[in-house]
Image (cartoon, grey):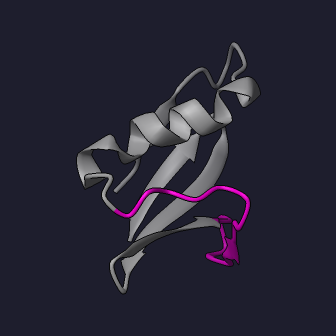
């Protein structure tokens, strides 16, 4: 499980059965699967942050201007 702060939004990426699964996360640990963003299975872990940046860049603000890997 890899956690990201994507422009102020907590997200989790998990590898399961050869696929990347994306979830919205919360401070309490509750997660909700994101189905409208599909992360290519062949994408290396090292590129996940950049991929989330590409998908969610329209949510950038002055305070939250990038994707940060948390774990």
Q: Residue at coordinates 27% horizontally, 54% vertically from top-left?
A: 45
**Front position in the image: 31 or 52:** 52
The overriding secondary structure of the stretch rendered in magenta is loop
Name which residue lies at 53% across and 26% down. Answer: 66
Q: Is residue 64 left or right of residue 49?
A: right
The image shows residue 54 at horizontal and vertical percentages of 55, 31
The image shows residue 63 at horizontal and vertical percentages of 67, 19
Q: Quadrant of residue 29?
A: bottom right
Q: Residue at x 67, y 46 (%)?
A: 9
Image coordinates for residue 22, horizontal then vertical, percent: 56, 65
- Whether residue 42 sits left or right of residue 62 in the image: it is left
Horizontally, is 18 left or right of 38 in the view? left
Q: Position of residue 27 (x, y in %)?
A: 65, 65
Is residue 40 inside the magenta stretch?
yes
Above or below residue 43? Residue 22 is below
Tell whether position 66 is magenta: no
Farthest residue, direction top: 62
Horizontal placement of 14 versus 61: left or right? left
On screen, residue 32 above or below 66? below
What stretch of residues is rendered in magenta?
24-41
């Amino acid at each position: 499980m890899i956690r990201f702060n994507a422009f102020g939004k907590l997200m989790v990426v998990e590898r399961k059965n050869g696929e990347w699964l994306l979830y919205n996360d919360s401070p309490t640990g509750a997660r909700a699967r994101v189905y409208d963003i599909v992360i290519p299975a062949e994408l290396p872990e090292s590129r996940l942050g950049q991929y989330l940046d590409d998908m969610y860049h329209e949510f950038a603000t002055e305070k939250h201007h990038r994707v940060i890997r948390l774990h």
